[in-house]
């Protein structure tokens, strides 16, 4: 950012707090705003002209989704025999977790 001198007074513009988000939008990334009334992040319309960026709102570049985590386990009524990232001969259940750690699927093998 360049400073400007007017009538001998030096003005230094403040950095744009949304510069990174605006650049990502121009680069084709998905932008989200925080919908406080829903307590969640929502995608914006990708065909908007970019004037949506208001500093009074919370904006972010939509995070890349991380792959689900799969864990195999051996479950027994009287004991728990542990986790494994790969299926072992004694594995009798497959648990799938999303990128937040929430269990999204459980399968009996």
Image (cartoon, rainbow, N blue to C red):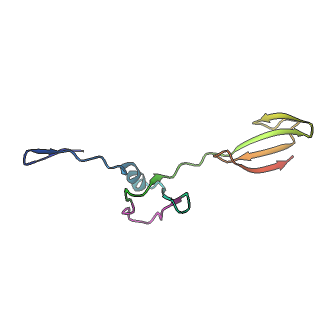
User: Quick check: 76 above or below 38?
Assistant: above
Q: Which residues are magenta?
A: 41-52
Which residue is depicted at the point 59% across and 49% down?
A: 65
Magenta residues: mostly which secondary structure? Answer: loop
Taking the view exactly as shown, the residue that stands out farthest to the left is 7
Relative placement, left or right, of 108 versus 101 is right
Percent from the top left, x then y, of residue 95?
Answer: 77, 45
User: Quick check: 29 above or below 80?
Assistant: below
Relative placement, left or right, of 8 versus 81 is left
Percent from the top left, x then y, of residue 13?
Answer: 23, 47
Q: Is residue 48 one of those drawn in magenta?
A: yes
Relative placement, left or right, of 80 versus 63 is right
Percent from the top left, x then y, of residue 7?
Answer: 7, 48
Percent from the top left, x then y, of residue 81?
Answer: 85, 33
- Identify the image quadrant of the N terminus: top left
Taking the view exactly as shown, the residue that stands out farthest to the front is 37
Instruction: Depth check: give the residue in front, 70 or 5.
Output: 5
Which residue is depicted at the point 82% across and 39% down?
A: 73
């Amino acid at each position: 950012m360049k400073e400007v001198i007017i009538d001998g007074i030096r003005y230094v513009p403040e950095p744009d707090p949304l510069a990174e988000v605006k650049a990502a939008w121009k680069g084709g990334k998905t932008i989200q705003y925080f919908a406080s009334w829903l307590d969640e992040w929502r995608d914006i319309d990708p065909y908007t002209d970019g004037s949506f960026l208001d500093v009074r709102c919370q904006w972010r570049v939509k995070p890349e989704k991380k792959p689900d985590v799969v864990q195999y386990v051996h479950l027994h009524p009287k004991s728990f025999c542990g986790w494994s990232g790969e299926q072992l001969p004694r594995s009798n259940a497959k648990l799938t977790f999303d990128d937040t750690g929430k269990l999204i699927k459980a399968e009996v093998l």
